[in-house]
Image (cartoon, rainbow, N blue to C red):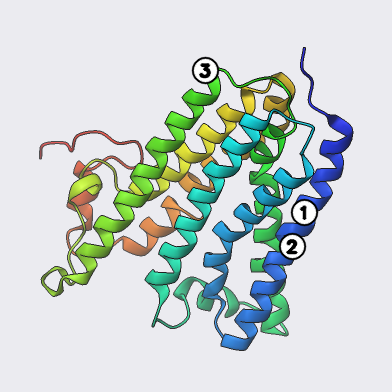
Amino acid sequence: MNPLAWDVFAANLGWAAATALAVMLGTFAMALNLAMHRVVDVAWGVAFAAVAVVTFGLSDGQGDPGRRLLVTGLILVWGLRLAVHIARRGSGHGEDPRYEEMLSRARGNRNVYALRKIYLLQGALVWLVSLPVQAAQYTPRPLSALAWAGTAVWAVGLFFEAVGDAQLARFKAAPANRGLIMDRGLWRLTRHPNYFGDFCVWWGLFLVACDGGWQAAAVSVVSPLVMSMLLINGSGKRLLERHMAGRPGWDAYAARTSAFFPRPPRRG
């Protein structure tokens, strides 16, 4: 039996929380300087990468070196790609309408409201969702096939995210597509290839954590469950589709295209 190193893992939880908080507070200071809170979306991927790197350093001598390198590398690739993509997408644009709407409901100081409702909340989510990344680095069991299966699921997710984002960016950049609904490439198979990709990324990372034993699995299963809920019923798919409803062509697209999990479009 190769148990999770509970004592050092518990200390790591505190350092991971401090790391996520530091990234979010630094981003909050930047947002105040720019007078724009959309920069927090860039910090989302950066915060996960920072937590992974800090955990990698703290877990030296505790977990299997192969699994530590694997899970840290996976989260760095995912988090930094996402941060760069969001930074490029938002370059030259003003405040995100989502944050404008949220802050319009603020009672009292808008910046204090933003700190509580956006930055501290996202910092807490980073800490919670990153549990597989943390737990995987504190299990001494050698890598097995389950870790590589998780890596394969992660790779499918990264493919859907990266390719879906690139396809949508090219579609929006073409003046002829102004006002049209994106229904090509991966967007023919699912209305949300990027959200489905994120779903696969976190279930894949959970499988890598499971490879370390049942204790790591038990402590980190909340992560993919929370992400699945957010992506499907929370701030992901549900919120975006509410925004898209009523656009010309949306109803026909929604009728023939899977809401989340990829499949060939229905024939209408």
Q: Which residue is mark 1?
A: 17
Say which label, 3 or 2, has the lower sequence index.
2
Extreme residue toward the right, this view: 7
For residue 230, say whether it is visible: yes
What residue do we see at 74% from left, 23% from top?
215
Q: CA distance from mark 3 to mark 2?
A: 35 Å
Give the quadrant of residue 40.
bottom right
What residue do we see at 57% from left, 73% from top?
102
- Please state which of the two labelled residues, at mark 3 or mark 1, is closer to the viewer: 3
User: Residue 262, relative to residue 188: is it above or below?
Assistant: above
Do the CB atoms of the residues marked 1 and 2 lie less than 8 Å apart?
yes
The tally of labels here is 3
User: Residue 181, relative to residue 173: is it above or below?
Assistant: above
User: Residue 65, relative to residue 228: is it above or below?
Assistant: above
Say which label, 3 or 1, has the lower sequence index.
1
User: Residue 65 at what x, y percent from top left?
Assistant: 67, 31
Say what secondary structure mark 3 lies in.
helix
User: Residue 95, relative to residue 164: is it above or below?
Assistant: below
Q: Amino acid at mark 3?
A: Ala
Query: Callout 1 environment at 10 Å: few (<14), some (14 to 19), or many (20+)?
Result: some
Query: Callout 3 environment at 10 Å: few (<14), some (14 to 19), or many (20+)?
Result: few
Q: Which residue is mark 3?
A: 145
Q: Which residue is mark 2?
A: 21
Q: Amino acid at mark 2?
A: Leu
What residue do we see at 21% from left, 71% from top?
173
In the picture, which quadrant includes the C terminus? top left
Say what secondary structure mark 2 lies in.
helix
